[in-house]
Each structure stands twice: as C-alpha cells, then as structure tokens.
Image: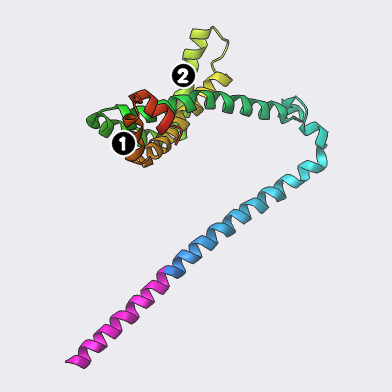
Amino acid sequence: MTKLVNRKMTFNTKYRQLLEFVVEAIIRISGYSAVVFVGLIFLFLMQESLPTFGEIQARDLWSQRWYPIENYFGVLPLLSGSLIITLGAALIAIPFGLMTAIFIAEIAPLWLREILKPLVEILGGVPSVVLGFLGITVLAPLVREELYLPTGLTAFTGAILLAGMAIPTIVSVAEDALDAVPKAYRDAALALGATRWQTIWRDLASS
C-alpha cells in the first residue's frame, strides 16, 4: 500500500513538473514571438521608408508646408499641432483629474464613492475610436456653432477629446495614491489643528 502511494505521489510530481515545463515553454515562445514580430514590423517599415529619404531632402522634412499631393512633407505643422493639443489636454485633464480624485478619496460619502470609482474605471476602458467618433459627430459641430468657426475640427476640439481620454487614468492613479497615504498623517494633521481642506491640500496631496 505504501509503495502504491509513493508511486502515485511520484507520478503526480512528475506530471506537475512536465505541465509546468510545457506552460513555461509556451509563455517563453509567446514572449519571444512578440519581440520577433515587433522587430519584423520595424524592419518592414524601414525597408518601405528608406527610398523616401533618397527622394526628399532632410531640409524639406522640416519645412512648414504639409501637402503630400504636391510632394511637400514638412513635419513642423504636425509637430506643432501635436504639441498644442497635448499641452491643451494637460491643462484640462490634470486639474480636473486631481480634483476628481480628491473628491472621490476624501470628500465623497462611501455609497457615492462605490458608484464613482467603478464608473471612472469603465470610462477608462472606452475605446479611443468611440471617443473620436463622438468628437466628430457631437463635439466638433458644437464647437463650430458656439464659436462661430468655419469648422469644428480644431486643436481645441482635439485637446478636449485627448483630455477626456486621459482623465480616467489620472483619476484612478491619483485616487490610489491618496488611498496609500497612511491614516496617521490625517490624524496628525487634524490633531495639530489643521482643517479638513488644509489636511487634504498640504498633507495628503503633497505626500
């Protein structure tokens, strides 16, 4: 009986080791395959783009004209537009995201926090394609009508959309950071006579 039990235990041990080896091999192959595929994509893009550098001079790439139909490929308008939209989105998303995180972590009652926190996480999972579609169909016409512009596809519209994509992430990260602050910090600040807002802004936010 003892020998039978020992054989069964040995078989189970070898089976687990074999299964672990197979799973580890699959994970390694998957990881290496991802790296190889990314490398192949990079090589393909390099191969397809190299002839362009022989036809277009480097100074033309840094011109202020972007009109591919007439072979003007200046990247300055693209870079400046991306920079303006990014800065505008940061000016909108960072203050709004931090204030929302502070409200959820420190001010909102428990029942409201249990509603807002999952809602923010759901908003963070909305595909950017959906937000872009809403921007073109809803936000852009609204901007055009309210600001009396010939088109609603402006940097302001792009900044609002990009901020909408970034706010859920900022709220989640900031709210988790506030939750990680030890409770002793709050108690110490209140014991020293600090108000609730002083505790939030000078103690918790700075931590």
Q: Which disc number belongs to residue 159?
A: none
Spatial distance from mark 2 to mark 1, Cα to Cα?
Answer: 25 Å
Residue at the disc numbered 2: 139
Q: Amino acid at mark 2?
A: Leu
Q: Element type at marker 2?
A: helix
Q: Is residue 26 above or below residue 74?
A: below
Task: Name the side, left or right, on which 34 lies relative to 125.
Answer: right
Whether residue 172 is in magenta: the answer is: no
Total numbered badges shown on the rendered structure: 2
Task: Name the side, left or right, on which 205 lies relative to 13.
Answer: right
Q: Element type at marker 1?
A: helix
- Highlighted range, magenta: 1-23
Q: Quadrant of residue 185?
A: top left
Q: Is residue 148 above or below residue 115?
A: above
Label 2 or label 1, whichever lies nearer to me, is: 1
Q: Earlier in the sequence, mark 2 or mark 1?
A: 1
Residue at the disc numbered 1: 118
Name the residue rendered at 69%, 26% in the picture. Answer: 77
Pick the residue in front: 202 or 42: 202
Pick the residue in front: 147 or 187: 187
Q: Amino acid at mark 1?
A: Pro
Task: Name the side, left or right, on which 124 lies relative to 163.
Answer: left
Locate residue 29, reporting x and y percent: 50, 65
Locate residue 84, reporting x and y percent: 61, 24
Name the residue rendered at 44%, 19% in the picture. Answer: 138
Q: Quadrant of the N terminus?
A: bottom left
